[in-house]
Structure formats: structure tokens, C-alpha cells
Amino acid sequence: MKIAAYEVRPDEKPIIEGLCKEYGIELVSTPANLDASTVDMAEGCEGVTMLGQSDLSDPIIDKLADYGCQVLAARCVGFDHMNRHYARSKGMHVCHGSYAANGVAEYTVMAILMCIRNYKKAQANTDDNDFTLKGKMGRELRSLTVGVMGTGKIGRTVIQLLSSFGCRILAYDIFQNDEVRKYAEYVDLDTILAESDVITLHMPLLEDTKGMISKENVMKMKDGVVLINNARGELCDVDALIWGVENEKIGALFMDAFPGEVGIIHLGHDADIIRTEGMPYFKLKYLRSFVNVYHTPHMAFFTQEAAESMARCGVDAIYELLTKGETQHEVPKNM
């Protein structure tokens, strides 16, 4: 058995190599993305594993199929970057990673607290030896209503953590969960937009969720709403975010994910010029200039525990499918 591993980070490398050695798998690996310039590395490989920045468009999938690839295994939880329907039509299995929800959930609570306590301004002023309290008055979570959009594993864990703060919690999801009802009230989309002081996104990126945070929906939110996106950047229309911040509809914005981040995040760009179609990076730079906008480089997931789990999933999914014909990591056929 031979597999190709792309986007291999230094923290993943020993785990992936160790598992391949244990399972008797021949491994070829690279830190580079899977794309037209690197796809030939996968020739003769029965499985390919990658993170979320690789190109899995139809021409790449065609080449992988020609090379004998039977399994595509993303090591990240999201699978929106994989043309999974086309891959299945070429006879491939499509898999994704998993990890405990705690890392992203804890990061989300941190993000909420940073926003409602004006941390960015406080830190910037303190670094500039301005020790006044001007512009730094915050809010307490217990007095706020928090809306959680998406109540899958991560959303549920966020709700459980928030319950200890004593805030009112609203939830929105087309698939409702009895465990969530112990802590939160399920409401419709218009209600969660209109009544939440804080809105945090934990939905997968699908056709019906792409661009859900539109200008129309931002306009339905409370004045001064705190908006947190630690999920997928494309859940938000970037122009709607800019409008909301400029018009003070959005009182604070925390983005660990940003539309058009492929080719930008997890790479060093301190000595080059970033060019992105539609100027998403320019818009990101503009948003970051506001004192109430926070941006981190898609790192909410990045804990020692989660990174190890993701690395294992990529190898295990391929090995299990090729030796047993099934794996818990396969993306359901209806998705």
C-alpha cells in the first residue's frame, strides 16, 4: 500500500510517518498543497490525504483516478473543498478528519470574552503606554443573549460552556438536538438574528449556508451585535461584514476564518505580495484596521490534542478502507 500526504505540517510529520511505518505503508509526503504542480507525486498511490487548502477540482481528481487513487482523506473536519460527488463518480471514497470539539469551543468563548471586554483596544493602548479607561467599558456575559448558529459537535460544546456564565442562549439548526435543549432555546433564523447580542457561527459550509451572513441578515441583527466566525469564512459575505462594521451595526467582529483565505493562511507572506481574485485580502486588511475587528489565522482548531487526532484520521481512513472496506471517517453519501 502506498499513500501520498500533502500539506504536512511539522507537528503532523512524525505522527503520519510513525503510523505508516506501523501499518507497513509506503509514504510520500510534502508540505506543499495538492494542485496541478504537485499531483504527479501521487502516481501509484492508492490513497491521498491533505488538509483544507489543496485543489480537489475535477481535473485533479481525474489525474488521481488515473494514478490509481481509491481514497481521498482530508485531515480537517471540513470537506467543502473536496468535489466529493465527482470523486465518488470516479470510484473514490471521500473521508474527513475529526477531533474533540473542546479546542474550537474554548477558543470561541475566549473570542466572545475578548470582544465584549474590548481587548484589542485595551492591548493596543497599553502597548502605547495609554493606561486610561476611555473606550474600554465592557459587558458581562450573564446580561447578554448569545445565539449559536449550528448545533453540531462544536456548537453543542460551545453551548455547554456558555451555560456556566448564566447568559440566555438561543440556538439555530435545521437538525435540532435534545441535549442542546437542556441549555438553550431553539428559535428560527429571524429570531436568533434579531434577539442575540452575540452571534457565533458553527455551521458547515454547504450550498444553503454559503453567504448566510448577508447584508440582509446583518441588517436584521441588533445594533452593536458581536459576530464570531470560527467556522468557515464563506459563511459570511465580506462586503456585508464591511457594511456592518462601517455602519456600527456590528459592534465587534472576530474572524478566525475569512472568505478567500486559501493560499494566504498558514503561510508566511512577510516578504512577498499577496494577490487574490476579487481583492479579498485587501478587504481583510481594511477590516483589520478597525479597533473592534479581530482576526486570527484559522487556528481555533490548533491544539496538540486536535492536531494529533487529525493526523491519525488521514492515515487511518485510508488504511481502514483499503484493508477492511469501511471507516468511521467516510463522509456520508448524502453529503
Image: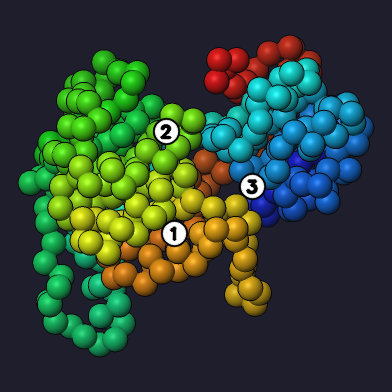
**Residue at 30% of width from left, 18% of height from top?**
176
Residue underneath mark 1 = 296
Q: Report the number of discs.
A: 3
Determine the secondary structure under disc 2. loop
Snapshot quadrant of residue 239: bottom left
Snapshot quadrant of residue 311: top right
Comparing 309 with 238, the one in front is: 238
Comparing 294 with 158, the one in front is: 294
| Separation of residues labelled 2 and 1 (CA atoms) | 22 Å
Q: Is residue 224 visible?
A: yes
The dot on residue 209 is: 2
Sequence-wise, the earlier of marks 3 and 1 is 3
| Amino acid at the residue labelled 3 | Gln
Q: Nearer the viewer, mark 3 or mark 1?
A: 3
Q: Is residue 93 visible?
A: no
Q: Are marks 3 and 2 in contact (CB under 8 Å)?
A: no
**Residue at 26% of width from left, 46% of height from top?**
218
Q: Nearer the viewer, mark 2 or mark 1?
A: 2
**In this rendering, position of residue 334 left or right of residue 232:** right
**In this rendering, position of residue 93 left or right of residue 224:** right
Residue underneath mark 3 = 53
Quarter of the rendering occupied by the N terminus: top right
Outermost residue, left side:
143
Q: Position of residue 108 (x, y in %)?
A: 33, 47
| Amino acid at the residue labelled 2 | Thr
Q: Position of residue 96 (x, y in %)?
A: 60, 30
The dot on residue 280 is: none
**Residue at 21% of width from left, 38% of height from top?**
193
Q: Position of residue 64 (x, y in %)?
A: 83, 32
Determine the secondary structure under disc 3. loop
